Amino acid sequence: MPEPILRVERLTKIYPGGVQALRDVSFEVQRGEFLVIVGLSGSGKSTLLRCINRLVEPTSGRIYVDGVDVTALDPEGLRRLRREIGMIFQQFNLVKRLDVLTNVLCGRLGYVPPVWSLVNYWPPEVRHRALQSLERVGIRDKAYVRADQLSGGQQQRVGIARALMQEPKIILADEPVASLDPATSHSVLRYVEELNRKEGITVLCSLHFLSLARRYGTRAIALREGRIVFDGHPAEIDERRFREIYGEDAVEVEIA
Amino acid sequence: MAVEPHARPVAQRAWEPALGWRSCQRLLLLAITALAFVYGWRVTRIDLGELVTKVGLIRPLVRDLVRPEILERVPVTQTAAASVSLSGPPPEEVPSAGPRLRLSTRAVRMGQRVQVVGEGFGPDRPGELLWEDQSGAQAKLTDLRTDPQGRFSLWIRIPDTIGTTGRILVRVYLPQTTWRPSETLRLVAERMVETVFLALMGTAMGVAFALPLSFLGARNLAHGPVGATVYFATRTVLNILRSIEPLILATVFAVWVGIGPFAGVLALGVHSLASLGKLYSEAIESIDPGPIEAITATGASWLQVVRYAVIPQIVPQFIAFTIYRWDINVRMSTVIGFVGGGGIGFLLQQYINLLLWQRVATAVWAITLVVAAMDYLSARVREKIT
């Protein structure tokens, strides 16, 4: 078995208020997987994703990305790690007052010389790459529009283009379609899927809808109260397992 | 010693006296408030009757306030001059049209009597002859009156003087008068310009220091123990500075760098930096954390995060706060002169002390106009950016 791209060992996170978000979570992710993370709101999905690039500091446990212990990195090492991990967010998290192109260019901040970036100078090849990224998500024509002028689906595609600029090994997607309508959800996830299939980028994606998990995931893990309660193929989540994950009263809602 | 055998139910015990105590509390509060107002009335010597009985004292002030010294009436004058030499050959005569002077001789000695003949002036008008020495100092020689033909002829003695040349000047007052801006207006305008620039420099100084400080004083940008320490230190310094009134700051700086506009700039600058630092920091704290998280996740450094996730979000608010501060500073700069901070206030205070109410009126009107104009301007700018 090859070295997994991501190995999480006994990860625990307790927030300062005492909320225990993750309890002793361990799993491995192989290169090229599309791992879907499901679970109720508050089950620890966001915390888990944010621990991987240390936007949230783990309380205990270890995380290895490509064999490197993330939890032991110094600030400089952490920046190098982060630039290889793309991230997309439920609220897109674009800088609304900047134009789309600059938002995409921001994905390259970890690579360009710091002084250039502070005066908003971007080398031509970086600008070219940014336009190509926009091309890939089908909104090349929106490059010079302010980000807040775009629809939700378009904004999320800008988010994907920004992540793409990082040439990431891993993409962390935190509820990327939870703010979008069903049709737009599919179009956004198809772009993520394409990156996973064609570029071989490993994807960790938290989703609310099991139907989306079954459609896009090559594997799923389910969290409940900070613990992994399921790890397998999304298709294996049947009625019984569903109740284990979401509680006895839950009823599955389909998304077309 | 009697022990109460059966305590009443706790809830009842707690409730019943509470009702009475509450209304008692209210009455007490009312009494204290009333006492405070009675004492306040006495200690501040409020006497509404004085507003009526002493109305005579304010009358000249009010009357003069509506008659500011803006223009002054001056008579139209006719002038002419002739140069003389006290050593050597006489200077060449420059022929001129209109009013002119002729002298019996133009090579003169001190004490020599010279006839001065003037022509082409207004008929039957008063005037005066002046001596101007080589350094330009003037001294009156004599009064004169022109004849019905607009001429005059009189003998004068060349006064004791310095230099080797001199000029004899004549000034004849015509019956017409003309208006010109008053000396007060000129002074007030000069000081008003100083005031506006005093506000500008003070604001600029405040902004220049508040900008970097605000990032250190924003909680959402403070990471780790070092960040937290810097945050608390910055906020504490800003709070202390902000609690000092600009007028007191101006007094201190007037002692330090001397009375004048620079003291005012420093006072306004320090106060602006403290208050803008707080406003800016709070603007930074209220931004959407999403983009910060997203940019951080790309592997950007702290400076890059500030540049791309923070600054774009705060620019409109920063501009609004800066204009707001500029407004305050324009107002403040008009009074900062009272304590030695330069600007119009310095002049206004002098006029007030000398009871020159018409000049006070000129300054007050100038302040009103300029402040209103700045208000309007900043309102327009604010409209544009939001």
Image (cartoon, coloured by chain):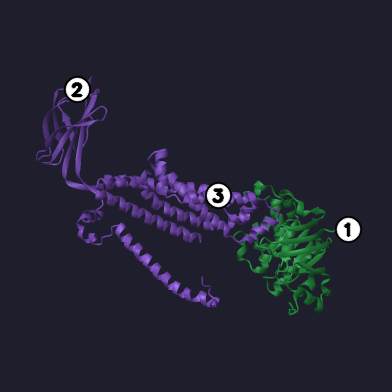
Chain colours: A green, B purple
Image mark 1: chain: A
Disc 2 marks which residue? B107
In space, the residues marked 3 and 1 are separated at their CA atoms by: 52 Å
Which element carries disc 2, helix, strand or loop?
Answer: loop
View extreme (right): residue? A1
Disc 1 marks which residue? A2
Q: Nearer the viewer, mark 3 or mark 2?
A: 3
View extreme (left): residue? B148
**Front-most of B39 and A9?**
B39
Image mark 2: chain: B
Query: Is A14 on the left or on the right of B366, as rendered?
Result: right
Disc 3 marks which residue? B234
Image mark 3: chain: B
Mark 2 surroundings within 10 Å by alpha-carbon count, few (fewer than 14), some (14 through 19), many (20 or more) = some
Name above or below for residue B91 compared with residue B152.
above
The answer to whether one can see residue A37 in this image is yes
